[in-house]
Amino acid sequence: MTQHVKTEIAAGIMTMTLARVEKKNALTNDMYRALSDGLERAESDPAIRVVLFQGDGDSFTSGNDIADFSAQADASHSGESQAFRFVLNLGKATRPLIAAVQGNAVGIGTTMLLHCDLVFLAETAKLMTPFVNLALVPEAASTWLLPARVGHVRAYAMFALGEPLDAAAAVACGLANAVVPAADLRARAWQAAESLTKRPAGALSHTKALMRETDKIGAQMSREIELFAERLRSGEAREAFAAFAERRKPDFTNLPSD
Ligand code: COA
């Protein structure tokens, strides 16, 4: 059990709070496990009607823990990827998912929002998907879902150049519902969650199912996961992870494109 995800259930709402503030809520395998366990429980427990994601500290999450990426790139690593399990659970979720986001939402921190049904941002929110900077490919079906929301060129700039999207731009292109003052963020998300708990759960889940092509989303996630796992072990990715650990810029110029 990790202490870095706090899971609380009250008033029909499961709140999962990322709480690894000293690392900007970077997600470890154990944290993904806790998030997945929570989502699976929400699917099977009729008392849970809504799931709410939030993060402690000044960042929602800095994305996957890069040291964990490095460990997975090690050929001897054979552990199950809880990150992939989490992504697949997001794709299949039938309960309403809500996110309250402040500060950095990097990588999965942004791509998971594409699976949330209501998203509230503090003015500080900064959405970033710098997968190519880490020599990886995007995940969570974001290669389909992000261009569908923001258009190809903006999505490409986010994936390939790591261009951030600020809170106002994210609302303008339909990635989030509203920008709210940081001090009101949690209350606003909770209020939205509460109002959903009072709606008929059957109608909500059918509506969500009709809005999402879950089979296609699952198939795209599987394609991405296969490539992602391959890229993790590439020489390019080793250089990117080493550069992050050594606090320097990566140098890909003399690497073959493997
Ligand atoms: N994995 C592991 N550690 C991370 C991390 C990550 N994704 N993101 C931040 N950290 C750690 C830093 O190494 C630092 O640790 P230290 O205090 O032991 O040195 C600590 O968290 C604070 O991060 P710092 O970079 O000092 O904070 P910042 O406010 O200047 O910048 C970010 C915040 C999120 C912009 C920056 O940390 C960052 O770019 N992180 C990497 C994001 C990323 O590429 N994620 C993977 C996406 S696929």
Image (cartoon, rainbow, N blue to C red):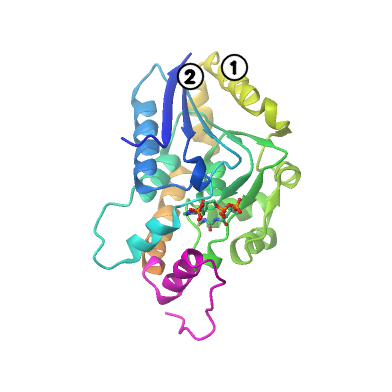
Visible residue check, residue 159 = yes
CA–CA distance in space, label 2 to label 1: 12 Å
Q: Is mark 2 on a helix, strand or loop?
A: helix
Q: Which mark is residue 195?
A: 1
The residue positioned 30% from the left and 66% from the top of the image is 74
User: Which quarter of the picture shows residue 160?
Assistant: bottom right
The residue positioned 44% from the left and 31% from the top of the image is 94
Circle 1: residue type = Ser
Q: Where is residue 34 in the image (x, y as percent from the top left)?
A: 36, 36
Q: What element carries label 1?
A: helix
User: Which span is picked out in magenta?
Assistant: 232-258
User: Which quarter of the picture shows residue 238?
Assistant: bottom left
Within 10 Å of disc 1 (Cα), the crowding (few <14, some 14-19, many 20+) is: few
Within 10 Å of disc 2 (Cα), the crowding (few <14, some 14-19, many 20+) is: some
Residue tagged 2: 201
Q: Position of residue 6 (x, y in %)?
A: 43, 30
Q: In this view, does 29 lie to the left or right of 256?
A: left
Q: Which of marks 2 and 1 is nearer the N terminus?
A: 1
Which of pointers 2 and 1 indicates the residue nearer the eye? 1
Visible residue check, residue 25 = no
The residue positioned 35% from the left and 37% from the top of the image is 2
Q: In this view, does 153 lie above or below 6?
A: below
Q: Where is residue 189 in the image (x, y as percent from the top left)?
A: 61, 26
